[in-house]
Amino acid sequence: MDLQSLCKVILVSALISLVCHPCSVTAGDIVHDDDSAPKKPGCENDFVLVKVQTWVNGIEDAEFVGVGARFGTAIVSKEKNANQRRLVLSDPRDCCSHPKNK
Protein backbone atom coordinates (compact mmCIF):
# COMPACT_ATOMS: atom_id res chain seq x y z
CA MET A 1 0.00 0.00 0.00
CA ASP A 2 1.54 3.31 -0.98
CA LEU A 3 1.55 6.44 1.17
CA GLN A 4 -1.29 8.16 -0.69
CA SER A 5 -3.59 5.15 -0.30
CA LEU A 6 -2.74 4.91 3.39
CA CYS A 7 -3.50 8.60 3.90
CA LYS A 8 -6.85 8.21 2.12
CA VAL A 9 -7.77 5.27 4.37
CA ILE A 10 -6.90 7.30 7.48
CA LEU A 11 -8.87 10.29 6.21
CA VAL A 12 -11.96 8.20 5.42
CA SER A 13 -11.75 6.51 8.84
CA ALA A 14 -11.57 9.87 10.58
CA LEU A 15 -14.53 11.23 8.60
CA ILE A 16 -16.64 8.14 9.37
CA SER A 17 -15.78 8.51 13.04
CA LEU A 18 -16.81 12.18 13.04
CA VAL A 19 -20.10 11.42 11.27
CA CYS A 20 -20.97 8.49 13.56
CA HIS A 21 -20.21 10.43 16.76
CA PRO A 22 -21.31 14.03 16.06
CA CYS A 23 -21.92 14.80 19.74
CA SER A 24 -18.22 14.48 20.57
CA VAL A 25 -17.12 17.13 18.06
CA THR A 26 -18.75 20.52 17.72
CA ALA A 27 -17.80 23.69 15.89
CA GLY A 28 -14.78 25.33 17.45
CA ASP A 29 -13.62 22.25 19.39
CA ILE A 30 -10.05 21.20 18.71
CA VAL A 31 -9.36 19.22 21.90
CA HIS A 32 -11.52 16.44 23.29
CA ASP A 33 -10.78 14.70 26.57
CA ASP A 34 -12.46 11.30 26.78
CA ASP A 35 -13.20 10.72 30.47
CA SER A 36 -14.54 7.20 29.89
CA ALA A 37 -11.32 5.89 28.29
CA PRO A 38 -8.81 4.46 30.79
CA LYS A 39 -5.67 6.55 31.27
CA LYS A 40 -2.36 4.80 31.78
CA PRO A 41 1.13 6.32 32.02
CA GLY A 42 2.16 7.24 28.48
CA CYS A 43 -1.44 6.99 27.23
CA GLU A 44 -3.03 10.11 28.69
CA ASN A 45 -2.93 12.62 25.82
CA ASP A 46 -6.09 14.52 24.89
CA PHE A 47 -7.61 13.78 21.50
CA VAL A 48 -6.62 16.74 19.30
CA LEU A 49 -7.94 17.64 15.86
CA VAL A 50 -4.91 17.83 13.56
CA LYS A 51 -4.20 18.99 10.03
CA VAL A 52 -1.25 17.47 8.19
CA GLN A 53 0.02 19.46 5.24
CA THR A 54 2.01 17.57 2.60
CA TRP A 55 4.60 18.87 0.17
CA VAL A 56 5.82 17.19 -3.01
CA ASN A 57 9.19 18.39 -4.34
CA GLY A 58 8.92 21.52 -2.19
CA ILE A 59 5.44 22.42 -3.48
CA GLU A 60 2.46 22.47 -1.11
CA ASP A 61 0.12 19.58 -1.87
CA ALA A 62 -2.83 17.85 -0.16
CA GLU A 63 -3.91 18.54 3.41
CA PHE A 64 -5.28 15.73 5.59
CA VAL A 65 -7.41 16.16 8.70
CA GLY A 66 -7.51 13.65 11.52
CA VAL A 67 -7.47 13.11 15.27
CA GLY A 68 -4.34 12.63 17.34
CA ALA A 69 -3.86 9.53 19.46
CA ARG A 70 -4.07 9.03 23.22
CA PHE A 71 -0.51 7.59 23.17
CA GLY A 72 2.86 8.87 21.93
CA THR A 73 4.43 12.30 21.79
CA ALA A 74 2.06 15.23 22.20
CA ILE A 75 1.17 16.93 18.91
CA VAL A 76 2.65 20.35 18.13
CA SER A 77 -0.01 23.01 18.62
CA LYS A 78 1.39 25.66 16.29
CA GLU A 79 2.53 25.18 12.71
CA LYS A 80 5.53 27.44 13.28
CA ASN A 81 6.79 24.93 15.88
CA ALA A 82 6.29 21.89 13.62
CA ASN A 83 9.01 20.16 11.64
CA GLN A 84 8.93 19.64 7.90
CA ARG A 85 10.81 16.44 7.11
CA ARG A 86 11.42 14.26 4.09
CA LEU A 87 9.61 10.96 3.90
CA VAL A 88 11.93 8.03 4.43
CA LEU A 89 10.83 4.53 3.51
CA SER A 90 11.84 1.81 5.93
CA ASP A 91 14.58 -0.64 4.99
CA PRO A 92 13.46 -3.39 5.11
CA ARG A 93 9.81 -2.63 4.46
CA ASP A 94 8.53 -4.99 7.17
CA CYS A 95 10.85 -3.36 9.78
CA CYS A 96 11.71 -6.84 11.12
CA SER A 97 14.17 -8.38 8.66
CA HIS A 98 17.84 -7.43 8.48
CA PRO A 99 18.55 -4.24 6.47
CA LYS A 100 19.45 -4.68 2.80
CA ASN A 101 21.73 -1.62 2.87
CA LYS A 102 24.10 -0.86 5.73
Image (tube, rainbow, N blue to C red):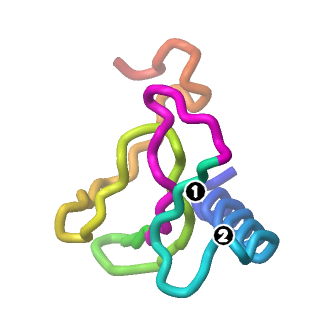
Taking the image as shown, residue 61 lies to the left or right of residue 14, namely left
Q: Residue drawn at (36%, 47%), measured in percent from left and top? A: 74
Taking the image as shown, residue 1 lies to the left or right of residue 7, namely right
Extent of the magenta region: 36-51
Rendered location of residue 39, percent (x, y): 55, 34
Q: Residue drawn at (56%, 66%), measured in percent from left and top? A: 66
Rendered location of residue 93, percent (x, y): 57, 32
Q: Give the residue number, with chain letter if any, for mark 2.
A: 24
**What residue occupies the far right of the structure in this picture?**
20
Would you say the residues marked 2 and 1 are in contact, meaning their CB atoms lie under 8 Å apart? no
- Is residue 37 magenta-colored? yes
Q: Which mark is residue 3?
A: 1
Front one among 37 and 86: 37
Rendered location of residue 84, percent (x, y): 26, 60
Residue type, label 1: Leu
**What residue occupies the far top of the structure in this picture?**
98
**What residue occupies the far bottom of the structure in this picture?**
27
Residue 45 in which image quadrant? top left
Residue type, label 2: Ser
Q: Residue drawn at (39%, 44%), measured in percent from left and top? A: 88
